[in-house]
Image (tube, rainbow, N blue to C red):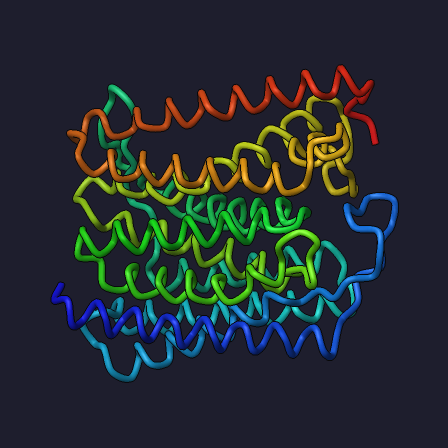
Amino acid sequence: MLPSAIAGHLAFAVLLALISAGAVRAMIAWPILDHPNHRSAHSVPTPRGGGVGPVLAFMLGVLVLYGVADAARLAERQFVGVLLAAVAIAGVALVDDVRHLSARLRLAAQLLAALVAIGSGLVLTRIALPWIGAVELGWLGVPLTLFWILGCTNAVNFMDGLDGLAGGTVLIASAALCLIAAQQGGGFVYAAALFLAAGFLGFLPFNLHPARIFMGDVGSQFAGFMLAVLAIAASRFDVNQVSFLIVPLLLFGLLFDAAFTLARRALAGQRLGEAHRTHLYQMAQRSGVPVRAIAAAHWGFAVFHAALGMLFLALPASLKPLVVVPALAVQAAWLAFVLRRMRRAGLSWSG
């Protein structure tokens, strides 16, 4: 990519970041207030819906991409499908931020958006496994793709409960994905990740502790959905679709916490749809770890995972799936740290 092109892309990204910041400031001036309750990490009413900024910046970027950059688009049907699905996710989530929709309705909207993306042709057809190699998924491709999109969308949403944590992680992951896609020649993934990173760059300063505004479902569900879709698009970087692992790797800190918490609650016989405050990041905060330190730890995870993503590109295909092992080791160490803090503070998983 030519230096002049890179400079132009960065200038456009800065413009999108400024637009995002302007939208976030508007959401602070005319707020949708989030009143604290017994599960909240904040103690005073705080605006939410700041994710409108990243959504607006991303959509404007995509519209420009659609108009002027044919080479950076997916096939026409896929491009339009992804855009419509993303708009649907953001729209329903914004209504949820205002009116608190039922969990079933939120899930139905996510399911519909995922089916639109799948219907557009974004489906995993094969996946690489350690020591086994590429495995053809056949008819399992559709349900596994659906599971991934819904899982990633909700994981990012679940992890947006502490100032700066999810927003900073999404920013780092999107920027890293942008760099990786640029190296691999993935035009659409490069552009979409750039727009996403720009949007969250404009949002994050307002979300740092103590937050002036929260992302809200409009931001977290949109970011989770788009990164899930970009993971599938990134799988086209190689013939065996092993590159699908890049986005899960970049988001591994968020995905690990969400998956561990879901599995633990399921094994304990707890209702999975019931509100709680027992994610690892929440237990760390309740045990006395400062909010800024927890957010910084997750940003550190994201930077480490970005470095692993770069290593991933250099490994032979047979070893690429093993890059998740050091990521898992870091999360196991974080889990051990949180458990030790919980014991010292006399906390349990209940509540």
Occupied quadrant, residue 47: bottom right
Q: In the visual, does 141 lie left or right of 216?
A: left
- Viewer-closest of 220 and 117: 220
Residue 340 x/y as whole percent? 68, 16
- Viewer-closest of 191 and 270: 191
Q: Quadrant of the C terminus?
A: top right
Q: Which residue sits furthest bottom?
A: 67
In the rendered image, the vertical position of residue 61 relative to residue 268, given as above or below: below
Going 36% across and 49% down the picture, which residue do you hit? 231
Occupied quadrant, residue 212: bottom right
Query: Tag count in the figure?
Result: 0
Going 18% across and 30% down the picture, which residue do you hit? 315
Going 30% across and 59% down the picture, which residue do you hit? 189
Going 36% across and 28% down the picture, which residue do you hit? 324
Residue 347 x/y as whole percent? 80, 22
Q: Quadrant of the N terminus?
A: bottom left
Q: In the visual, does 15 lie left or right of 21?
A: left
Q: Which residue sits furthest left?
A: 2
Residue 96 x/y as whole percent? 72, 65
Q: Which residue sits furthest right?
A: 38
Q: In the visual, does 111 lie left or right of 3?
A: right
In the rendered image, the vertical position of residue 313 relative to residue 194, given as above or below: above
Residue 112 x/y as whole percent? 54, 62
Occupied quadrant, residue 343: top right
